[in-house]
């Protein structure tokens, strides 16, 4: 009887080790979406999917890894030409972003929350936004974001967006504010759409294709928010998609397409509901990691161990 217990224990141990190795391998790489705005306030990279590995060998996957690999993939000359980082009194910090060295005037957020340092961890599906301050004296650039990262709609349908900004109260506690009077930009073209007092705006896109929605303001310097919209020509159900669309930049000036955009103008700042079936917050993230193989492996091995043990008991009787 003892030998059957020993054998079963060995199988269970093998199962445990196999699962541990499998799960460990799954965390070796995560996919994140990186957006970067350059020194001129242009979104030079929009929700670019980056496969993140531990390039600095600190034992975890971080903002630093994501930004380094984004430059390695998209910046002319790679990360060595466009990206820099160093340990400072504030922790792991940026020294160069998209080819700009300005003494440390940069910002970076994960899922629209301010990061403490480049050493902050990233997870599957995260949205990493980094920017170079255009105002390097008063640092008045205001980080802002839309309530959705991406959308899929039909030609002529309405899409409602809400623009929020990061700020501070009188005691310097972080707060979120709605951005009023921001003008909507579609593929680099300024429209007459403007956000209302609650940061809401309803837009309508007539042409089909992929579009980058952003915003600017006459009252403040906005770090360009981005929402990637895919407009279909068929009359199918309209949905807001969690899947980030990837825009390939043709230059390091802007990712906006140079083609004109047909936009149906309605009353700017209206709050009519958009033709969408679901609303996805910008902080939410798609979970695309597939753990089915490791799960099946563990189940198979565990079931085999149990059957083996049962057979041993039967034979003993």
Image (cartoon, helix red, strand yellow):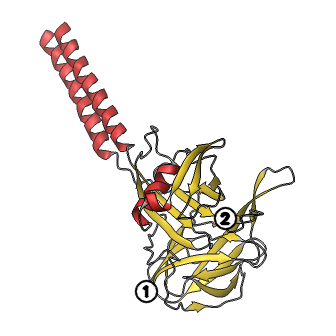
Q: Residue at x 76, y 55 (%)?
A: 175
Q: Secondary structure at mark 1?
A: loop
- Disc number lying in front (2 or 1): 2
Most extreme residue toward the right is: 170
Provide the residue designation for mark 2. 133
Image quadrant where residue 179 sits: bottom right
Q: How many marks?
A: 2
Q: Depth check: 204 or 275 in front?
A: 204
Q: Nearer the viewer, residue 10 or 223?
A: 223
The residue depicted at 27 percent of the width and 28 percent of the height is 15
Residue shown at the point (38%, 50%) measured from the top left: 289
Of the 4 image quadrants, the one containing the C terminus is: top left
Image position of 261 with respect to 245: above or below? below
Q: Residue at x 63, y 86 (%)?
A: 190
Quadrant for residue 21, please give it. top left
Give how far apart the Cα atoms at labels 2 and 1 are: 39 Å
Quadrant including the N terminus: top left
Query: Is residue 302 positioned above or below 282 on the image?
Result: above
Up-down: is 48 above or below 11? Answer: below
Label 2 SS: loop
Q: Looking at the rendering, which quadrant does residue 107 occupy?
A: bottom right
Image spot of residue 118 (x, y percent): 56, 48
Which circle marks residue 233 in the picture?
A: 1
């Amino acid at each position: 009887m003892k030998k059957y217990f020993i054998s079963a224990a060995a199988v269970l141990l093998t199962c445990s080790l196999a699962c541990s190795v499998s799960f460990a391998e799954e965390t070796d790489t995560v996919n994140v979406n990186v957006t970067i705005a350059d020194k001129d306030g242009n979104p030079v990279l929009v929700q670019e999917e980056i496969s993140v590995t531990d390039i600095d060998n600190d034992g975890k996957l971080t903002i630093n890894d994501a930004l380094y690999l984004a430059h390695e993939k998209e910046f002319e000359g790679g990360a060595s030409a466009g990206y820099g980082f160093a340990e400072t009194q504030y922790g792991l910090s940026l020294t160069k972003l998209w080819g700009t060295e300005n003494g440390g005037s940069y910002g970076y957020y994960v899922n629209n929350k301010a990061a403490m340092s480049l050493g902050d961890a990233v997870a599957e599906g995260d949205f990493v936004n980094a920017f170079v301050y255009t105002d390097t004296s008063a640092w008045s650039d205001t980080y802002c974001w839309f309530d959705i990262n991406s959308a899929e709609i039909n030609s002529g349908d309405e899409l409602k967006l809400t623009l929020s900004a990061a700020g501070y109260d009188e005691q310097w506690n972080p707060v979120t504010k709605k951005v009023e009077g921001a003008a909507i930009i579609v593929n680099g073209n300024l429209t007459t759409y403007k956000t209302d007092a609650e940061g809401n705006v309803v837009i309508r896109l007539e042409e089909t294709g992929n579009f980058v929605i952003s915003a600017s303001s006459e009252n403040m310097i906005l770090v360009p928010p981005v929402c990637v919209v895919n407009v279909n020509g068929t009359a199918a159900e309209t949905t807001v998609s969690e899947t980030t669309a990837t825009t390939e930049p043709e230059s390091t000036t802007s990712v906006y397409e140079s083609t004109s955009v047909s936009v149906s103008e309605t009353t700017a700042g209206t709050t009519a509901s958009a033709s969408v079936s679901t609303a996805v917050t910008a902080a939410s993230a798609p979970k695309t990691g597939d753990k089915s193989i490791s799960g099946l492996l563990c189940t198979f091995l565990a079931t085999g161990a149990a059957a083996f043990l049962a057979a041993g008991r039967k034979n003993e009787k």
